[in-house]
Amino acid sequence: MTTSFAPRASHHRSWSSIAAGTHALAAGELIILSYLRRVVLVGCASAVTTEQMAFLIRHTTGFLQVALHERICDRLVLPEATPTVRASSTLGHGQCVTVDAAAGITTGISGADRAHTARILADPATEPGDLTRPGHLVPVRVTPTEFRTHQTTASLALALTETAESQRSGAVFADLDGIADPTSIGDRHDAEILADWYGLTLVAGPDLKGNVR
């Protein structure tokens, strides 16, 4: 499991396969996923640590989301913030009303609090009353079709984390911040820089025909 994010000696890291990404996630690490013109940091919601959540907050836009199966969102009474009339290509597709854990947190916004809420979302024993609304994490519902065909970045992140941690489903993710240009969203070049600094696994998602890019 990743326990330290101390910068490492420079070593150019290449883009890896889906299998390498699931292996890294299963080892408790964060990965960088490039898919459908988005570059996101991804971790298993069920096991995300305070340190990992702080790393996500620091190196992304800070808009933390947790991809969940639609059936789990329905069970936890997590309605979409805007009913799905949006195309799956829009960034807001599937986003639900924000949540915090109902117990075990303070304000809900710290890395520790958001990590705790993410783990609560991924816990199969969680009930609707274990969450308060609104909060500081954004659940994203993934439909069966999206999950099967990897129509969205959220659905592929969920598929990767579910392969890595099959008993507790959920993917915490956020869009990478720009490094070369801090005023922009991060791209693949920024991802390579961050991966080089911290030894993260770079994962190139498949195209819609199933080919790894």
Image (tube, rainbow, N blue to C red):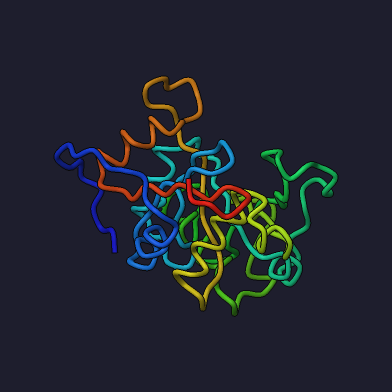
In this orientation, which residue lies closer to the viewer: 148 or 3?
A: 148
Identity of the residue drawn at 71% across and 69% down: 76
Residue 42: percent from the left, percent from the top?
A: 46, 52
Q: Position of residue 81 (x, y in %)?
A: 77, 48
Question: Residue 8 in the image: x percent, y percent?
Answer: 17, 42
The total of numbered circles placed on residues is 0
Residue sticking out furthest to the left: 9
Query: Does residue 35 sit above or below 76 in this rendering?
Result: above
Relative placement, left or right, of 176 versus 123 is left
At x 60%, y 64%, the residue is 102
Please give left or right for residue 210 compared with residue 183 in the image. Answer: right
159 versus 166 height, above or below: above
Image quarter of the N terminus = bottom left
Task: Give the camera-side residue of 39 and 5.
Answer: 39
98 or 68: nearer the viewer: 68
Q: Which residue is painted at 54% across and 44% down in the image?
A: 35
In the rendered image, residue 201, in percent from the top left (x then y), is placed at 34, 50
196 sits left or right of 180 in the view = left
Residue plotted at (58% across, 50% down): 65
